[in-house]
Image: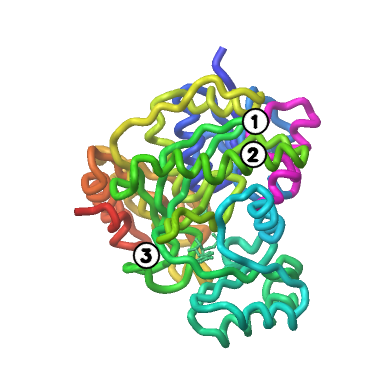
Amino acid sequence: MTRRVVVVGSGGREHALADVLGRTSDVIVTPGNPGISGSVSTPATELDADLFVIGPEVPLVDGLADELRAQGKLVFGPGADGARLEGSKAWMKELFVAAGVPTADHGAFTELEPALAFLSTMEPPFVVKTDGLAAGKGVLVTDDRGAAEAAVAEYLSGTAFGDAGTTVVIEEGLVGPEVSVFAICDGNSAVALAAAQDHKRVGDGDSGPNTGGMGAYTPLPWADDGLVDTVMQLAIEPTLAELGRRGIDYRGVLYAGLMLTESGPKMLEYNVRFGDPETQVVLPRIESDLAQLLTEAAAGKIEHQPVFASDAVVVVVCASEWYPASSRTGDVIDGIDDARALDGVSVYCAGVEKDDHEQLVTAGGRVLNVVGRGATVDEAAARAYAGVDLISWPGMHHRRDIAWQART
Ligand code: AMP
Ligand code: GLY
């Protein structure tokens, strides 16, 4: 009998999960979106399946995995206890120290005076973060000491991010290329997927404000062959051991965001879910059965190692006008079918909905993910951009330089 999988979420990451899980399983996505086939509005707690995969961080932090497990369901995604790694940066940093994981020096504060005193001992770049979830917007990296001080005061006052900001984390600024590594964890052990690189800034040449991510690629031809193994040894394995010592049975993704500094790799953060848009490039390269891997992890014992194709995948995020400050909605999207008809191109849907005429329209900041696949990063990028060039709506914007680090 074919395995039935429910994916929870509604973005491009969930579309990629549904697509790759769908190679071997029947997939339903809740709530999904009108661009993802198999989307249903029934909540996960009212669905039946052999496996539940939870995409976004908010339901994980809110305990959806616990609720589903209490119903006897098999779930890939940590409970609220493990999801605290993403829900509280102060807790995450404390765990890094306890586990001996290399990370930026830091302090966590609830009072203004000690926070400013700590900041006065730091050198630029200054890094100020909200403790709690802030939809990717709670991090300021700046060379301007005054701006950092103002952010500390604003976060702590609760005006900027509400309760998420009333504890702030102040960090040493790290410098170096940033990479994303996803580890699939079964509570005791973990296997790594291929490394990827995201592009956080909205504009070409890494200019402009931070976003949720404007594009990504894999593999990283410039990185050491041993990079993923190093991340497993330095970060993932000690973290799982420390979680275990705290009685936390972590079954889900540990997404390590790290910086390759001159003094070695240092962890910036964990997320407790797959990255968006890195998932859209990493998962298509898996040649083994992803549904089987996630089922084994959810059941507590990974028995099959993932196998990766050697080719390259690049994703370009197409965003609506005004993103990331806000987003313009309701614009009719043209050209998706033409892009999909190209060799080596697929399109995942994120912020979309259907209008009264059943046309797909924009409904969020990051609207579409155009994915190109090829023998090399150059070829994959050329294919992705050939797809992007066929797609349009009023105000659409995207970066032209995704994967510049690996293009020749
Ligand atoms: P986070 O949400 O913690 O991943 O932070 C968002 C982005 O801010 C990261 O992807 C980095 O580009 C940047 N960032 C975070 N922490 C640091 C740090 N300690 N030093 C330099 N940049 C950082
Ligand atoms: N790609 C960044 C994130 O998923 O948080």
Instruction: Name the side, left or right, on which 220 lies relative to 167.
Output: left
Q: Give, as a three-letter code, the residue at label 1.
A: Asn
Q: Earlier in the sequence, mark 3 or mark 1?
A: 1
Dot 1 lies on which element?
loop
Classify mark 2: residues with Cα within 10 Å, few (<14), some (14-19) or many (20+): many
Name the residue rendered at 69%, 47% in the picture: 83
Front one among 41 and 30? 30
Q: Nearer the viewer, residue 15 or 155?
A: 155
Check contact, mark 1 vs mark 2: CB within 8 A: yes
Q: Is mark 2 within 8 Å of ligand 1?
A: no
- Percent x, y for residue 232? 51, 40
* Residue 305: numbered disc: none
In the picture of the structure, the residue carrying the numbered disc 2 is 240
Instruction: Report, in whole angstroms, how far the alpha carbon at label 3 lies from the one at label 1.
Output: 43 Å
* Residue farthest to the top, as pictured: 1
The image shows residue 247 at horizontal and vertical percentages of: 77, 38
Residue at image coords 69%, 70%: 168
The dot on residue 397 is: 3
> What's the residue type where badge 2 is placed?
Leu
Q: Earlier in the sequence, mark 1 or mark 2?
A: 1
- Residue shown at the point (49%, 64%) measured from the top left: 211
Give the residue number, with chain letter if any, for mark 1: 188
For label 3, the SS is loop
Q: Is residue 163 magenta?
A: no
Is 378 rendered above or below residue 288?
below
User: In the rendered view, does 195 fall on the left or right side of 248?
Assistant: left
Q: What crowding class fits label 3: few (fewer than 14 Cα within 10 Å), some (14-19), or many (20 or more)? A: some
Magenta-highlighted residues: 62-86
Residue 12's place in the image compared with 18, above or below, is below
Left or right, 299 with respect to 35, comes to right
